[in-house]
Amino acid sequence: MHLPQQLSDVAALTGRRLAALLDAQIQLGTPERLVAAMRHAVLTGGKRFRPFLLIQSAGLFGVSPEQSVDAAAAIECVHCYSLVHDDLPSMDNDKLRRGQPTVWAAYDEWTAILVGDALQTLAFEILSSPATHQDGAVRSALISALAKASGAAGMVGGQALDLEAERLHGSGRCDADHIANLQAMKTGRLIKSACEMGAILGGAGAIERAALADYGDALGLAFQISDDLLDAEGGTETVGKATGKDAAAGKATLVGLLGASAARAALDRTVTQAVSCLAPFGGSAAPLIEAAQFMGRRTS
Amino acid sequence: MHLPQQLSDVAALTGRRLAALLDAQIQLGTPERLVAAMRHAVLTGGKRFRPFLLIQSAGLFGVSPEQSVDAAAAIECVHCYSLVHDDLPSMDNDKLRRGQPTVWAAYDEWTAILVGDALQTLAFEILSSPATHQDGAVRSALISALAKASGAAGMVGGQALDLEAERLHGSGRCDADHIANLQAMKTGRLIKSACEMGAILGGAGAIERAALADYGDALGLAFQISDDLLDAEGGTETVGKATGKDAAAGKATLVGLLGASAARAALDRTVTQAVSCLAPFGGSAAPLIEAAQFMGRRTS
C-alpha cells in the first residue's frame, strides 16, 4: 500500500473517531453552538499527519490502528486547538485555513478562544480514558509526553518566541539557531511526541523509543522547512491558506535567512537523517520512511 | 486552628509549590517573558480556595498537605488559566483583578492567550508526574476528573453559555434554571472536582467520594451566589476588582433575577445543604464545614 492511501485511511479513521467524540459532547451537556464550533475546528479537512505518525509508530509494535486511534485523536485535538488560537486576530490574524474561514472568522473571537481551550482539555480527557489503554501508567505516560511537548517549554513556548521575534524584536535580531530552536519548539516537539506516544502505546523499550524520538525530531524539522518553502513558493490555491504571509509579517524563517536553495539542501539532509533513525525497524518502517521522503517533495 | 489560618497556610504552601514549578520552567527552556507572564497570572494573590478544598478533602483520608499539594497546584493552574482567558477583551474585558492589571493589560492579548494555554497544559503535566502520586491509575483518575470538570461540558462550556446569554440572546431570555445550570458548569464543576480529586488522592470508597462530590456541588452553588451578591453589593476597594459590572453588562445572575434578599435566602439553604453532606466524616470535616459557612458571610 502506498503512502497517499495510508495517509487517507488514517485520516478517515481519525476523522470518524473525532466526529464520534464530538457527538458525545452533546449528550454530556456541552452547549450546541460550542460543539458546532469545535466540529468546525476539527472536522474541516486536515491531513491528520500527527495521527498518522502515532498510529504507524504504534504499529511497529503490533498495535492496530483501531487500538491507537484514541491517542491519535487526542494529539489531533491539541494540533487543532493550536491552529484555532494561532489564527486569532491578536496572533497570526488568519481568516482562511484549509480553504475555509478560521473559527474566529466563522464565529467570533471569544468562541474561538473557548474552542481552543476545550479542545486542549478534550485531548487530555481522551488520554485519561481506559478506552485509550487499559493500563493507567501507560495513560499517564501518554499524557506526560503530550503535555511536555505542547506546553510552555514546547509548542506554546515556540509560538511565544515566534511572536516575540516578530512583534518585540523585529526579525533582524534572530539568527539561524534561534529560528531553528523556536521552530523545533513550535512544530517539532508535537510531531516528535506523536512518534513517542506510538512507542509508549506499543510498550517500546528505551532504545526503540529513542530511535522513534530521533526520527520525530528530524521529521519535525523537515516539516517546518518544507512548510516555510511552501509559504515562500506556493500559491494560495495549492496550499489552501494565504501564502507569502510570513515574509509580509517580517516573520523569521530559515528560508528567509538562508535563501530557498540552502533551505532545500537542509531539507534533503534532514530527510536522510530521519530515514536513518528507522534502520532498527527494518521493512516494517516503510510507511514512516515514505513519510519522511514525502517531506522532501511536498506541494501542499 | 481557625479557618482564616488554615486558608492562609494552604495558600502559602500552594503558592510556594506553584512558584517552584514555574521556576523549573526556565530550566526546561520556556521563554523568560512567557514564564514572567505565567508568574503574574498565578502568583499575584488569590485565595487558593480550590487547593484548600482538595487538600482538606484528601486530609479526611490521612493524606498530608505536602502529599496533596501537587494536585492542588494543578487545579489552581486551571483556575488561573480560566481567569486569564475570561479577562480578555473579547470576553469579559477586565483590566483589573486582585487589585493588579490582568495579564493582557500588563502584557498584551496574545501573551495572555498563550499564558492561559500553557497553564492548562501545565496542570495536566503536573498531574501526570509520579511526584503527584506513585500509582499511574490514580494519576489518570485525577486527570479524568479535572478534564471533565474543566472542559466543554464543564467550566469552558459554562463560560460559553454565559457569553452566549449576554451577547447572543440578551439576559431576558434566561430563566433561573438556565442561570443555575450555566453557573454550575462555569464555577461549580471545578469546585466540585477539587473535592473529588481529594477523595481520589485519598483512595476514598464510592460512598465517601459521592458525599464529597455532593458537598462540592452545593459549595460551588453557594460560592457563585455569594460572588453575585458581592458583585451587586460590594465596592471595588473590598473586592479588588471592578464591581457592578455584571449588571452593567446585562449579565445573567441569580441576584439580578431573584433580587438580593431571595438570593441570600437561597445562599443560606445551600450552605446548610453543603454542611449536611459532610455528616459521614464527623469532626474531622470541621474545616470543610467552616468553609461552607464562610460562603454565607463572604465580604471579599
Image (spheres, coloured by chain):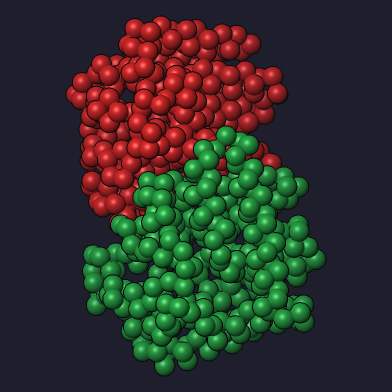
Chain colours: A red, B green
**Residue B96 picture quarter:** bottom left
Identify the image quadrant of residue A63: top right
- Say which quadrant the N terminus of chain A sits in: top left
Q: Residue at x 27, y 35 (%)?
A: A97
Q: With B137 as the anchor, is B89 left or right in this view?
A: left
Asked whether residue A207 is in view, the answer is: yes
Among all residues in the image, which is located at the extreme right? B62
The residue lying toward the viewer, choosing from A289 and A216, is A216
Residue A8: image x %, image y %?
37, 24
Where on the picture, by quarter, is residue A32?
bottom left
Residue B190: percent from left, percent from top: 53, 64
Horizontally, residue B29 falls left or right of residue B153, namely: right
**In the image: residue B284, left or right of residue B108:** right
| Residue at the (46%, 89%) spot, across then down | B264
Q: Decide: is B39 above or below B101.
A: above
Q: Nearer the viewer, residue A277 or B32?
A: B32
* Residue B280 x, y percent position in the rendering: 73, 79
Q: Locate the C terminus of chain A by quadrant.
A: top left
Q: Residue at x 63, y 79 (%)?
A: B291
Q: How many marks?
A: 0
Q: Which of A55 and B110 is in front in this view?
A: B110
**Can residue A128 be seen?**
no
Q: Position of residue A124 (x, y in %)?
A: 53, 46
Which of the pair B234/A168 is nearer the observer? A168
Residue depicted at 73% across the width and 50% down the height:
B133
